[in-house]
Amino acid sequence: MVYRIHFTVDDLARTRVSPCSLPLMELAAAVRTLQQRGQAVRFGAWRRRALTDLRPEARMVLELVRARRWAPDFLTRAESGSPEDVLERVRATPRSRIRSDLAHVAADWPLPPWARHLADDRDLFRRLCDSLDHVYDVLLSPHWQQIASSATTEGGTKTRQALTGGMEHLLSSANPHCVRWNAPVLEVTMASGLDGDLLLEGRGLLLVPSYFGPRWSAVCTASQPQPVLTYPAHSPWDVGSLIARFPHAEHHSTPPSALAALLGPTRAAVLNAVAEHPGCSTNELAVLTGVAPSNASRHATTLRRAGLVHTVRYRNTALHTVTGLGTTLLDSPCALPDLHEG
C-alpha cells in the first residue's frame, strides 16, 4: 500500500526545498528513532546517552509518539521557527484541536488511558508540554545548531539538483527507499502503512530534510501554505558525523575486525568511513581513510556494485552514502559474496 501525492503542472512549479528542518517533525523523528533498535552505527551512542538522561516524565511523549504509528498532530506539526517558539505554541493549542487530533489517532491505535482527558484537563496538558520540553532538551537541543546549519547546506544541494536535473530527478531521488515518482504521482510507502491520496491542487509540496528520520519519509497534509514531505538528509555533516562529535559518544573510526577479515582492511575502512560521513566525496573518502583518491574510488565502486554503498553524482563529484545492507553489515558482520581486495 502506498500514499499517493498527485501533482499538476502548477504543483511542480511551486514545489520547493526547505532550507531548514522543522523542530516538531524532527523531534517526532528522533522520538521514533529512539524507540527502535536499528541504525546502531549512526544512533547507538546517541540512544544510550538519551536513555540515560531522560527522566520519568518523558514517558508521556513516548507513549503518544510511537514508532510506525500516527501521533497527535499538535505534537508533530510542520511549523517553522525556533524550537523554543514552536514548543511554546504547542502550549496554546485549543481544546478543540487537541480533541480532534486525539480522535484521529484513536482510530489508528488505542490511546493510553490518561490521554483521553487531555482536552479537558489543562493541568494534565501542561504536564504533557513539560514532558515535550524535556524530551527536546535531551534528544535534540544539544544538536540543533548543527542540524540547522546542515539543513541550509542540504537545501542548497537539493536546489542545485533540481536546477541541473529537473523536478523529476529531485522527486525521484528524495528517498529511493520509500518514495517513487510515477508521473504525475509521487508514491510514498509510509511506515504506518497508510493508503490514500493527496491532491495538491496547485499548492505544490515542501521537501524538508530530516536527520533523525534516516529511512522513512513523513507527510504533513495540514501544513500551510503547502503540504510537507520529509526526506533523509545525506550531507557530509549528517547526524552520523554529528553524534560522533558529541561528548562521550562512541567513535567508530576502526571497523570491526570480523568485517576487516571479510572485506579486507582498506575496503572495510572505506565502508566504515562512508557510514560515519554520509554524502562524502571520493576525495574526502581518501583523506578519511588515508589512501590515494584512485584507490578510494576503486573500493567505493566495488562496494557500490555489492549493494553496500549508494553513489550519486553532482556535476563532477561522486557523493557516497551507505545503504541499508551496508549498515546491517557494519552492525552485524555476516557472510556476503567475496569482496576481498584484489
Image: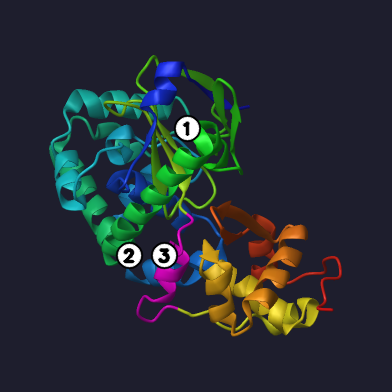
* First to last magenta residue range: 234-249
Residue 277 seen anywhere in this rendered image of the structure:
yes
Residue drawn at the location 46% of the way across and 39% of the way down: 162
Bin the neighbour count of mark 2 within 10 Å (Cα to Cα): few under 14, some 14-19, many 20 and up. some
What label sits on residue 241 in the rendered view?
none
Q: Earlier in the sequence, mark 3 or mark 1?
A: 1
How packed mark 1 is, by other alpha carbons closer than 10 Å (few <14, some 14-19, many 20 or more), is: few
Query: Which residue lies under the disc numbered 3?
Result: 237
User: Residue at horizontal 61%, vertical 44%?
Assistant: 177
Residue wearing tag 1? 109
Q: Magenta part mainly helix, strand or loop?
A: loop
Drawn side of residue 77 relative to residue 336, left or right: left
User: Is 203 left or right of 284, judged from the image as shown?
Assistant: left
Q: Earlier in the sequence, mark 2 or mark 3?
A: 2
Name the residue type under label 3.
Trp
Residue named by callout 2: 54
Q: Amino acid at mark 1?
A: Trp
Indicate the quadrant containing the C terminus: top left, top right, bottom left or bottom right: bottom right
